[in-house]
Image (cartoon, rainbow, N blue to C red):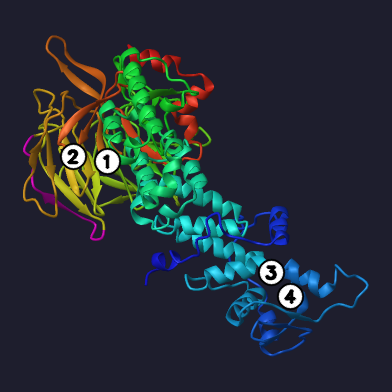
């Protein structure tokens, strides 16, 4: 049985778990130490274990539930456990002699493990012993073992066991683990619905708390509705009384009227006049909202957007005839673009952008005069920019990807020639290294990572727009050709999505393209066409979010005056094989780059809801309406 399935067996107590008044009072007073920064195995003097093994200088005895005796050194056991310190020193009954013996209710294997920790600083935790070990380590205040158990549970947390771990942590006042568990539940809610057998056992108060949370990571409120149905249908007779209260947790702003009509057909809603009336009124309110398009209020709960788990950063680019240092943020939950004040000091375009360990890295580029070999790093939490090690070569029109916590910069233009050189950045060493060059010189190409291999396609070699594509095997440090694309494409975007590569748009030497093509290395021998974009464009930005491919900005052909920069955004739905419109950026621009940072602790600052709270949405709203 694997670790995940073992951990699913952690006892689920919900709201029915009981403990004594004394225990509850102690937990209220006790400070949580379950995930302190210094938690982990310690190195104790080896002589302690030697003295224990040789039974030397022992001055006390502890007994397990079976009566087995362990000779110990009271000072050593007192050092890791305030409980034993108080017991052995008689700090409660100071007029009595110090105790030298202690009877415990700890099973023999667990007591042995706790004593091993006391003497060595090491403790073996696995799925078999973690529940008992945490229980008795908490009871006897061996806080180092509590920390190790909580760290183990955190490392093994998955959608199948997170609710069990969350309730288990609550029993032992592991508040930090509970906080992490609650965050994990909200961030992985969709997977939890399908993988957790414990979801249907949630108390209604717990479910309401989850569904009301602004940070709940759902791309549509339909998922919230499905969660409500699943929970209520598990015990419909008992739980249908909570249905109206649960429906009011939904944010109706991102539902269409036809989706709400579908909800009303659920039999339990049909039989509940209050629920039925609530949804009918909500439909009317939504229609009115779509007609009038009023400003969204933070207090209007039905239209209050959730906070996105993924924050999209659009940095730099070419706008109004020159490079820009503007940054915009896209809130996918509100479908709004927000201007940021976190601009870098140097405008640049034709650069690369990627996220790594919660940081945004901007690679190479061009400011209208200089071709950069620099890399800048932005910290979204501190809002600070910093300089990183320089690349070996200046690169604009560069292709950048991140794989296995390394940043790859491929090809580009150094101001004199198109290059085939490739270099890789190690953030731990703050150092670039040259690796095997590509088979062809390319600038204005695009790269993506699929199944641990790096692919690059299209571009310009200084004379011709290219349709060739190649693949880099990191293990062998070698490049090899893959099938050529159907169209030549410079300023193209290559995206890895659902086990396939998508080459989208670009410039064929005469015009900007709307066409796109798809290639799966595992099953295809050639590229195949997919539905064309609505807007022809090249040198645009591309990202995958919410299981869609987003296309942002770029150059667009005009019939009269040549090309122009645009702010149009559209996204591709692979299930329907169609392109849909999203809100446009505030700024027209091409040659920009975008990346997504997930799970920011301050994601509210970058959300539309956060701007609503600060009353700072007027400019973005005017831009959207314009």
Query: What is the quadrant of the C terminus in the image?
Result: top left
Residue under the image location 35 percent in, 18 percent down: 289
Q: Which residue is mark 2?
A: 574
In the rendered image, which quarter is residue 486 located in?
Answer: top left
Residue 476 shown in magenta: yes
Q: Secondary structure at mark 1?
A: loop
Q: Which mark is residue 547?
A: 1
Q: Which residue is mark 4?
A: 76
Mark 2: give few (<14), some (14-19) or many (20+) Cα within 10 Å: some
In the rendered image, which quarter is residue 94 located in?
Answer: bottom right
Residue 351, above or below 83: above
Quick one: label 3 or label 2, which is nearer the N terminus?
3
Q: Secondary structure at mark 3?
A: loop
Mark 4: give few (<14), some (14-19) or many (20+) Cα within 10 Å: some
Q: Which residue is mark 3?
A: 140
Looking at the picture, how far across and down is residue 384, in whole percent? Answer: 51, 33
């Amino acid at each position: 049985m694997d670790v995940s399935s073992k951990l699913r067996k952690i006892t689920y107590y919900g709201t029915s778990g009981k403990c004594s008044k004394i225990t509850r009072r102690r937990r209220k007073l006790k400070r949580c130490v379950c995930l302190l920064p210094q938690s982990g195995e310690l190195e104790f003097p080896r002589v302690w274990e030697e003295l224990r093994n040789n039974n030397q200088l022992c001055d006390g005895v502890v007994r397990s539930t079976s009566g087995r005796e362990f000779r110990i050194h009271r000072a050593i056991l007192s050092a890791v456990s305030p409980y034993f310190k108080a017991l052995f020193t008689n700090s409660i009954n100071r007029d009595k002699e110090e105790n030298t013996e202690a009877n415990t209710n700890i099973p023999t294997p667990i007591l042995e493990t706790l004593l091993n920790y006391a003497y060595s600083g090491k403790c073996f935790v696995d799925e078999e012993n973690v529940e008992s070990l945490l229980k008795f380590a908490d009871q006897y205040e061996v806080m180092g073992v509590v920390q190790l158990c909580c760290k183990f549970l955190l490392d093994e947390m998955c959608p199948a066991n997170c609710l069990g771990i969350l309730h288990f942590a609550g029993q032992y006042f592991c508040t930090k683990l509970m906080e992490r568990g609650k965050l994990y539940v909200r961030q992985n809610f969709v997977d939890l619905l399908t993988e957790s057998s414990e979801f249907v056992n949630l108390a209604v108060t717990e479910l309401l708390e989850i569904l009301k949370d602004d940070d709940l990571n759902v791309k549509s409120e339909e998922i919230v509705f499905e969660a409500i149905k699943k929970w209520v249908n598990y015990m419909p007779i008992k739980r249908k009384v909570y249905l109206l209260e649960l429906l009011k947790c939904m944010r109706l702003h991102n539902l269409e009227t036809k989706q709400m009509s579908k909800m009303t057909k659920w039999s339990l809603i049909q039989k509940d006049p209050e629920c039925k009336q609530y949804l009918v009124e909500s439909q009317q309110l939504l229609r009115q909202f779509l007609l009038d398009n009023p400003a969204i209020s933070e207090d209007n709960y039905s239209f209050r957007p959730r906070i996105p788990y993924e924050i999209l950063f659009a940095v730099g680019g070419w706008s109004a005839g020159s490079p820009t240092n503007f940054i915009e943020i896209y809130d996918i939950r509100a479908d709004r673009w927000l201007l940021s004040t976190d601009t870098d000091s140097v405008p640049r375009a034709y650069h690369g952008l990627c996220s790594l360990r919660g940081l945004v890295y901007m690679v190479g580029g061009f400011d209208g005069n200089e071709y950069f070999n620099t890399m800048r790093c932005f910290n979204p939490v501190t809002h600070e920019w910093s300089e990183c090690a320089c690349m070996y070569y200046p690169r604009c029109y560069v292709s950048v990807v991140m794989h296995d916590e390394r940043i790859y910069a491929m090809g580009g233009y150094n101001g004199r020639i198109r290059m085939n050189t490739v270099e890789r950045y190690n953030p731990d060493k703050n150092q670039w290294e040259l690796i095997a060059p590509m088979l062809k010189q390319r600038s204005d190409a695009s790269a993506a990572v699929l199944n641990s291999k790096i692919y690059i396609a299209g571009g310009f070699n200084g004379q011709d727009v290219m349709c060739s594509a190649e693949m880099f095997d990191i293990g062998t440090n070698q490049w090899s050709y893959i099938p050529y694309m159907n169209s030549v494409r410079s300023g193209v975007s290559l995206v890895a999505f659902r086990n396939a590569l998508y080459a989208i748009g670009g410039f064929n030497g005469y015009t900007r393209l709307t066409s796109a093509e798809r290639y799966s290395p595992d099953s295809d021998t050639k590229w195949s066409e997919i539905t064309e974009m609505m807007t022809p464009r090249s040198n645009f930005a591309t990202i995958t979010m919410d299981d869609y491919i987003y296309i942002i900005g770029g150059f667009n052909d005009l019939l009269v005056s040549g090309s122009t920069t645009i702010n149009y955004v559209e996204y591709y739905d692979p299930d329907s094989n169609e392109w849909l419109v999203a809100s446009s950026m505030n700024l027209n621009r091409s040659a920009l780059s975008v990346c997504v940072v997930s799970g920011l602790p301050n994601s509210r600052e970058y959300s539309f809801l956060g701007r609503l709270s600060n009353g700072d949405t007027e400019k973005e709203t005017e831009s959207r309406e314009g």
